[in-house]
């Protein structure tokens, strides 16, 4: 069964391929969906975004229409370039969403070509691509990128949840080629409007959005504390990443926020003080907003000590702990640790000195070194 994280990555990949593009085709073998498509055609709508909620994948179309799918055991989404041969039988197809070329020079345009780049060089420069490959090979997974890297002269919309810069801004022929997102064997697929989705008892709700205008530190603190009372043993970083508690924090910020607040990410919620929770919410807000103001959208805040600096600094210099396993803590010089955390096994980075352990038993220990190779770019 695909884990929530797999759906999360699937949704992100779909988002990169589809968002901002006009729907040029829609097919479905499901009568209920077909009826909606007959009444209010999908073709001509723009895909606004794709997001995950728990194990649900939500594709938002302009004109208040949301395609909601659940993979359960057997379902998967595949992404193909237009015209590419499917890797699964047509009889298993449930939904196809075809999109044309990108509307405008959006950052998320997955087809911004990297064809001038040598792929081997690209791998060396961006080790995260190696990790991302696993997204597409994930057999329990939701989206399968069927193109091999060697053939990827136009780049699939992978990313690592942290930063993706898809190629250079120059457009070329490949940006005129669209994508085809195909849902195979999805057992649940339905259309919603924003209102019907809100009323749906099945699809989980997101917590308050850290970036929403109405978000307040008090509200965020109350939310975390309420969750902590219900789940006293839940680990801090897992809670920060839980979109049903607070929406918006990704895997990078999770570690960065815990570091900035001086809270060990492995601590149980019951050990965390009000003041610490307040700090975490304040830093969440600050980092998220800073990132939005930068307009980078890549989840990266730039620092030099406490100060944010220019984009031009290497990514290495931008983050406190994320991606810095085995390197010296910028505050105290101790070695930054990393360990996979939670059901979804997301990488968590922390400084054992600055983020002291509070709780029963010994402090969790992470891996300090990564295969003896110092990573140039963290992920
Ligand atoms: Zn430290």
Image (spheres, rainbow, N blue to C red):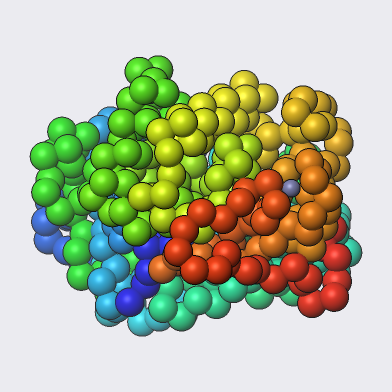
Residue at the extreme top of the image, as rendered: 213
Q: Is residue 9 left or right of residue 333?
A: left
- Which quadrant of the rendered structure holds the C terminus? bottom right
Give the x, y percent position of residue 244.
31, 45
Left or right of 3 on screen, residue 295: right
In-image side of 238 versus 340 (left or right): left
Residue 198 x/y as whole percent: 17, 37
74 or 321, nearer to the observer: 321
Residue 303, compared with residue 179, is above or below; it is above
Q: Residue at x 74, y 57 (%)?
A: 336
Q: Position of residue 159 (x, y in %)?
A: 61, 55
Left or right: residue 287 versus residue 234 is: right
Name the one closer to the observer, 135 or 166.
135
Please determine whether, in this image, residue 218 is positioned above or below residue 123. Answer: above
Which of the image's four quarters has the N terminus? bottom left
Q: Residue at x 61, y 51 (%)?
A: 356
Please say if 222 is above or below 239: above
**Is residue 213 shown above or below 151?**
above
Residue 233 visible? The answer is: yes
Residue at point 75% right, 68% down?
A: 368
Report x, y in % for residue 373.
85, 71
**In the rendered image, is residue 84 in sight?**
no
Quadrant housing residue 130: bottom right
| Number of marks drawn | 0
* Residue drawn at point x = 46 percent, y = 75 percent: 86
């Amino acid at each position: 069964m695909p884990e929530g994280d797999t759906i999360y990555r699937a949704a992100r990949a779909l988002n990169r391929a589809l968002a901002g593009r006009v729907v040029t085709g829609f097919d479905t073998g499901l009568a209920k969906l077909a009826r909606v498509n007959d009444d209010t055609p999908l073709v001509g709508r723009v895909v606004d975004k794709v997001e995950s909620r728990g194990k649900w994948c939500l594709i938002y179309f302009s004109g208040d229409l949301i395609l909601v799918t659940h993979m359960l055991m057997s379902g998967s989404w595949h992404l193909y370039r237009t015209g590419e041969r499917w890797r699964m039988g047509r009889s298993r197809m449930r939904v196809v969403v075809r999109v044309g070329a990108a509307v405008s020079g959006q950052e998320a345009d997955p087809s911004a070509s990297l064809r001038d780049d040598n792929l081997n060089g690209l791998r060396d420069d961006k080790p995260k691509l190696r990790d991302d490959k696993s997204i597409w090979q994930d057999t329990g997974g939701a989206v399968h990128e069927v193109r091999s890297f060697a053939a990827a002269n136009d780049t699939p919309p992978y990313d690592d949840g942290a930063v993706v810069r898809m190629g250079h801004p120059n457009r070329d022929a490949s940006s005129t080629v669209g994508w085809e997102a195909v849902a195979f064997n999805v057992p649940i697929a339905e259309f919603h409007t924003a209102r019907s989705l809100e009323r749906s008892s099945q699809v989980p709700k997101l917590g308050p959005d850290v970036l929403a205008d109405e978000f307040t530190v008090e509200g965020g603190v109350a939310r975390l504390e309420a969750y902590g009372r219900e789940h006293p043993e839940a680990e801090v970083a897992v809670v920060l990443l839980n979109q049903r508690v607070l929406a918006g924090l990704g895997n990078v910020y999770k570690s960065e926020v815990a570091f900035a607040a001086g809270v060990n990410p492995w601590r149980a919620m019951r050990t965390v003080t009000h003041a610490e929770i307040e700090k975490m919410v304040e830093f969440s807000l600050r980092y998220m907003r800073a990132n939005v103001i930068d307009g980078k959208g890549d989840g990266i805040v730039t620092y030099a000590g406490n100060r944010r600096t220019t984009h031009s600094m290497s990514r290495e210099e931008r983050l406190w702990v994320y991606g810095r396993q085995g390197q010296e803590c910028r505050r105290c010089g101790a070695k930054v640790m990393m360990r996979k955390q939670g059901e979804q096994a997301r990488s968590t980075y922390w400084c054992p000195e600055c983020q002291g352990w509070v709780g029963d038993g010994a402090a969790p220990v992470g891996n300090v070194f990564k295969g003896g190779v110092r990573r140039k770019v963290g992920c």
